[in-house]
Structures are given as structure tokens and as C-alpha cells.
Amino acid sequence: MKKNKWSKICLFIGCLALVWAFGGGPALGEMKTYNVTASWDFSGPYADIMRSWTGGQKIAFAWWNEEVGKQLGVQLNLKGYDLRYDATLVASKWPGILSGDQPIAHMGVGGPDVAALMKRLPTDKVPLFMSTATYGYIWGPGHWSFQPRPTYPHEAIGLYAYLSKLLKRKIKIACINSQGIPAYEEFVTGAKKYAEEVPDAVIEVVGVEWVPVRPVDITSQVARLLKKGPDFFDVFTNTPQVVATLRALQTLKQNIPIRMSSHNGLEMSAKALGTLKDFEGCYDSYSFRPAIDHSPPAYQVYLKYKDQIDKELEYDVAYVQAMMQATMLARAVERVAKAKGADKITGEELYNGMFDVNITSAELLGLLNDQYFTKDQPFTAKNMACMATMVKDGKHVLVSPDWMPIPEIPKW
């Protein structure tokens, strides 16, 4: 009797294995693993955020591998390289990475990756996925770079359009910037072109002061700009310039708000300064869901997988940026796997699968609004929008829970 019962159990287990292998999902031996490489920076200017950054990528892949890829017979293997946010190092190391890892895609950390790889990738057939805003020098067709965020001027003007509508007038901005860095300078170029060429532009650029990348004291420069009556100081460049601008305004006893971006925003700058309260009335804006908003599904994924990856991992702006980048890539893999099969995933298939597809906010775990790419530009061609946060009554809060539409901006 016991023998017969044991035989039935063995038969049942054998049937389950056959169902899994031929109908219920991929057999273990058929699981396809693909390498995805990434630029990291543990010894350069962004070393302080790399724990959060890499954690966001790792959690996105852990979630997708477990809850999506396993059913498709696909697993993604993340291989990161410390390239120090250095375009020369990216360019020199890339041939070895390409031949050694044969990645289906690469995740960049910033401008050096785009500058070093943008002319190579169409030949190498490896798409680049980014999470920074788009740089104007790749605003055009033919690039194998996907940047869900539009340019930095787009992200600023989205907030100014929102505020302009409330105030029923143009917003006057004064820019603090640095010469010699194209990705910095083009903010001024783009903002001025929009302000001067668009009849119903929501901003007026009243002045620009060019200061060192890491300024010590810019009180005299800020004082000159104050004479032009700005509503905002726009400091999208870096954290040291934000802190220097704030200190100058405090010295001059002026309460003009500063607008920042994601990489130097309220969260980052408050950490650098050691206090949030000094940023009362200041704003940041960018085209992804701020880390202070825990409503999207991405936050639940973070809670579920955090201990598996890093128990001390913070859900901050760097984490969110990297998680959205990895999620967009994983969803591209998913589309190809479903359409072509688990063994047909290549960089070229990923690239082709990104176009003319409605990529919904839900697919991207709520970290982005809906995305739609065409071959005419590397950033989303529809639904351009941003979100913004501010310090109000000493607290870091959302300006609005809704996405703020971004006006059309002329190409510069």
C-alpha cells in the first residue's frame, strides 16, 4: 500500500516537471542568460551616490528576473564597471567590454557615456539606456541612445510653465553656469533660444553669470543678477554652485528661490549643506517621479527586494533614477522575448523594439509618465512632462501630484 502511494507521488511530480518543461514555463536547462553592462563611478565625482545608483539597477533586475523573466525563460546578468565618469576611460574600456561580455545593452551613468559611445553604438549594435536628461548634442536621428527624459531646459521650462500659469505672467530667470562644459553651457543656449524665438514663451532670461565649476564665493555675481529683477535663480549645474548661490543670497539678505535639477536638487544640496530649512521656497524639477513620493509600485518593489540586495539601501533620487533606467531596459527585453522568443534577444532587436510603442507608466512601475520613442530623437516624442518638489514650511513636498506638461522647445 505504501509502495503504491509512493509510486503515485513520483508519477505526479514527474507530470509536473513535464508540464513545466513543455507547457507551464521554461525548463531550467532552457533558461537564457544575457549580459547587460553598466558604467559606474565609485572613484570619481559621483562616488557618493553609487551605492544608491547600483542598488536601483540591482533591485530592478532582481525583481524582473524573478517575477517576469523566469516565466519567459530569460535572465539578465548585470556587470558594472567603474569608469569614473570619464569619457576617455569609457572609450578606452568599451572595446574590451564589448568583446568580453557581448552585452545586449549598456546602461550609462551620464554625459561621458553618451559622448564616448554615441558614434560607436550603431556599428556595435548595442543600445545605450540612460536616466539623465538628454544632452542637446544628440538631439537628432540615428542615435542608439534612449533617454526617457527630455533635455535639461525642457525639465526647467515645464515647472516655469506651471508657475507662469498660476501667476499669469512670464517668469524671469537668472542663470548661474560654467563655461567650457558643453552639457552645462547648453542649458543657457536652450533657455535663451526658447525665450527669444517662441512667441508665448513662459520665461525671460534676464541674465547669466559664468562662474567656476566649484566656486568659493559668488556674492558679486549674484548681486549683479539681482539688479535685473529675477523671479528665480536657475542653477542646474552642480551642488557646489547651488550652495554658493544660496550663501550669496543669504549674505545679500535676499529670498529669491533657486531652481535645481535632479543631480543637484533639494535632496542632494540639503545633504551637502547639512540642512533643508535654508532652502525654504526653493524648487527642483525633472522628468521622473521624485523619491519623496512613495505612491508608485516601484516603492513596493524596493521594500520587497531591499534586504536581498542591501539592507541599508536608501530610496533616494539616485536610486530612483537608476531603477527607472534598468526597468525601461528590462521591459525592452520583455517585449522582444514575447515577440521573438527567449533565444532571439539581441541589441539590434532591443533597439528596433523601442520605436512606435506605447510604453505605459504602469510598465515603468510609475517612475515615469507614458513614453513613446521615434527615430527622430533620443527622448520621448510624446507626453513630455516633469514633476517638481519644493521646500515649504521646512518640509520637502511635491509641488503637485500630477505631471506638468512641457511646452515645445525649438531645437538648438
Image (cartoon, rainbow, N blue to C red):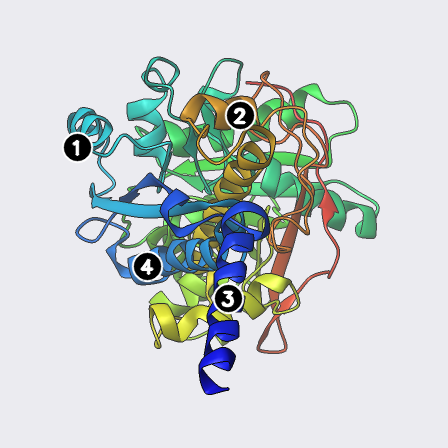
Q: Residue at x 73, y 30 (%)?
A: 201
Q: Amino acid at mark 4?
A: Ile
* Residue 11 badge: 3
Q: Are marks 1 and 2 in contact (CB under 8 Å)?
A: no
Q: Residue at x 73, y 61 (%)?
A: 401
Q: Nearer the viewer, residue 39 or 158?
A: 39
Which residue is tagged 1?
89
Pointer 1 local density, CA inside 10 Å: few below 14, some 14–19, many at least 20: some
Return the disc, 1 or 2, that comes first in the chain's sequence.
1
**Residue 137 horizontal/vertical position (percent):** 44, 20
* Residue 49 badge: 4
Q: Amino acid at mark 2?
A: Pro
**Residue 49 in which image quadrant:** bottom left
Q: Residue at x 61, y 46 (%)?
A: 230
Q: Amino acid at mark 1?
A: Leu
**Of helix, strand and loop, which one carries label 3?**
helix
Which residue is tagged 2?
378
Return the disc, 4 or 1, that comes first in the chain's sequence.
4
Q: Amino acid at mark 3?
A: Leu
**Residue 11 horizontal/vertical position (percent):** 50, 66
**Residue 117 horizontal/vertical position (percent):** 31, 24
In which quadrant of the rendered image does the C terminus lie? top right
Q: Residue furthest front?
A: 1
Return the disc, 4 or 3, that comes first in the chain's sequence.
3
Taking 210 as reference, is 16 left or right? right
CA–CA distance in space, label 3 to label 1: 58 Å
CA–CA distance in space, label 2 to label 4: 25 Å
